[in-house]
Image (cartoon, grey):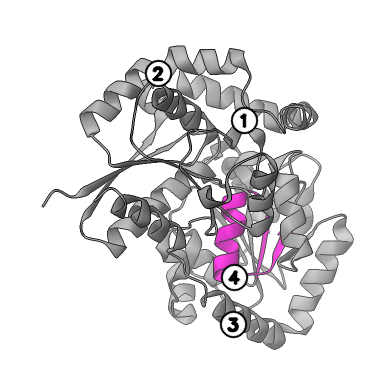
């Protein structure tokens, strides 16, 4: 019997969209041996030379001109992509994407970024009959996600569903599933073993993420965190930001047995499990991974736009707090030191409550789309 084929399309604007795509791929194959998946970052796959330049320009805009990005986000909030952008995507991707689909012969196409959704939607208007599923990877519903050709939206919360309903999306086209995270984030591990593995001590531990997107900043934020190094164990995950990793490694302030400096790693799930507090930018994917691990979160300077919406959702529901000044850091770090056993107990209870949710909800929703074609 021919396996059902799922083509999952993402884009490289940040890591969250592709992480969601990879998480879906792994989960689908875990729940059914009769499913075959293929994950593609469409721009990088079709235009490997041009795409890195586009992604670099996007990152520089976010880091150097966040207000401009926020203005563009709000200006376009209730609209689909403008005609110029749609035309550009058409010229760059349309014919080649059609050929990819023709060769791979997927039974369902899943998009975790608006750009592939726009391209596939245009193909559907031209006669493509394959079901299109869009997974919104934030806690907001920007207008660029919306297309009449989408057969199913998988969204993070009822609030996001309501926003789609207001935009005219039929209720039976929307399902609240949560954002997919890699199954590793739902597994439990022996903390003592993890500490031995990473060379960590059994003491209050804070994981700091987001170095690749401006968390390591000249204004001295990470230096302030490092002043707690005698009493708080600090793990800095700097991703692919090699310059930040090099700069901190050469800084005497960070040359301390209670500080770990890490570059890109595929073991964020284990680092979250062995930590007691997460400091991060409020990106949709990282926040959802932290939620799956039940770790309390502090959010550092949201980028105007979807990060502000993510921040609002997570703070309103008590999953974290925004860092408004160094007093926020002082309060939480002091609380960790003075109430460490209580912190660990509450963390364990929260993790147990969260694990009652279905981590494969997104994957089962996609399986239902596949079954309708049988």
Q: Closer to the camera, 280 or 287?
A: 287
Q: Is residue 7 left or right of residue 340?
A: left
Q: Earlier in the sequence, mark 1 or mark 2?
A: 1
Q: Which residue is mark 1?
A: 59
Return the x and y of residue 256 as percentages of the image width and height: 63, 62
> In front: mark 4 or mark 3?
3
Q: Residue at x 34, y 56 (%)?
A: 367
The reply to whether discs 4 and 1 touch (Cβ–Cβ < 8 Å) is no
Q: Earlier in the sequence, mark 3 or mark 2?
A: 2
Q: Residues within 10 Å of mark 2 (few under 14, many from 20)?
A: some
Spatial distance from mark 2 to mark 4, Cα to Cα? 45 Å
Q: Earlier in the sequence, mark 3 or mark 1?
A: 1
Q: Closer to the camera, 273 or 307?
A: 307
Spatial distance from mark 4 to mark 1, Cα to Cα? 28 Å
Residue interval drawn in magenta: 277-299
Q: Residue at x 57, y 45 (%)?
A: 170
Q: Residues within 10 Å of mark 4 (few under 14, many from 20)?
A: many
Q: Which mark is residue 275?
A: 4
Return the x and y of residue 360 as percentages of the image width and height: 42, 64
Q: Earlier in the sequence, mark 4 or mark 3?
A: 4
Q: Which residue is mark 2?
A: 94
Residue 227 visible in this rendered orientation of the protein: no
Q: Which residue is mark 3?
A: 348
Spatial distance from mark 4 to mark 3, Cα to Cα? 12 Å
Give the secondary structure at mark 2. helix
Give the secondary structure at mark 1. helix
Give the secondary structure at mark 4. loop
The reply to whether discs 3 and 1 touch (Cβ–Cβ < 8 Å) is no
């Amino acid at each position: 019997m021919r396996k059902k084929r799922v083509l999952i399309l993402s884009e490289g604007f940040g890591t969250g969209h592709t992480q969601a795509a990879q998480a879906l791929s792994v989960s689908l194959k875990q729940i059914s041996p009769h499913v075959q998946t293929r994950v593609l970052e469409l721009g990088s796959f079709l235009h490997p030379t041009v795409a890195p330049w586009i992604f670099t320009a996007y990152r520089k805009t976010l880091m150097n001109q966040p207000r401009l990005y926020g203005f563009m986000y709000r200006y376009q909030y209730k609209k689909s992509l403008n005609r110029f952008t749609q035309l550009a995507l058409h010229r760059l991707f349309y014919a080649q994407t059609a050929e990819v689909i023709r060769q791979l012969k997927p039974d369902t196409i899943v998009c975790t970024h608006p750009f592939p959704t726009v391209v596939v939607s245009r193909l559907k208007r031209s006669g493509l009959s394959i079901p299109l599923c869009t997974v919104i990877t934030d806690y907001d519903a920007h207008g660029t996600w919306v297309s009449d050709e989408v057969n199913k939206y998988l969204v993070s919360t009822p609030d996001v569903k309501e926003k789609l309903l207001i935009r005219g999306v039929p209720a039976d086209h929307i399902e609240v599933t949560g954002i997919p995270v890699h199954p590793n984030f739902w597994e439990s591990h022996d903390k003592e073993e993890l500490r031995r593995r990473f060379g960590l001590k059994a003491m209050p531990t804070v994981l700091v993420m987001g170095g690749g997107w401006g968390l390591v900043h000249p204004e001295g934020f990470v230096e302030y965190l490092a002043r707690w190094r005698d009493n708080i164990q600090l793990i800095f995950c700097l991703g692919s930001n090699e310059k930040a990793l090099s700069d901190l490694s050469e800084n005497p302030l960070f040359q301390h047995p209670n500080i770990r400096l890490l570059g890109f790693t595929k073991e964020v799930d284990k680092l979250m499990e062995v930590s007691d507090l997460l400091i991060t930018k409020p990106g949709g994917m990282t926040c959802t991974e932290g939620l799956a691990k039940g770790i309390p979160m502090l959010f550092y300077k949201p980028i105007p736009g979807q990060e502000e919406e993510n921040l609002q959702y997570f703070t309103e529901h008590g999953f974290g707090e925004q860092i408004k000044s160094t007093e926020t850091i002082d309060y939480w770090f002091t609380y960790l030191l003075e109430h460490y056993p209580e912190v660990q107990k509450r963390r364990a209870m929260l993790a147990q409550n969260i694990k009652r949710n279905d981590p494969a909800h997104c994957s089962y929703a996609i399986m239902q789309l596949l079954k309708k074609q049988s």
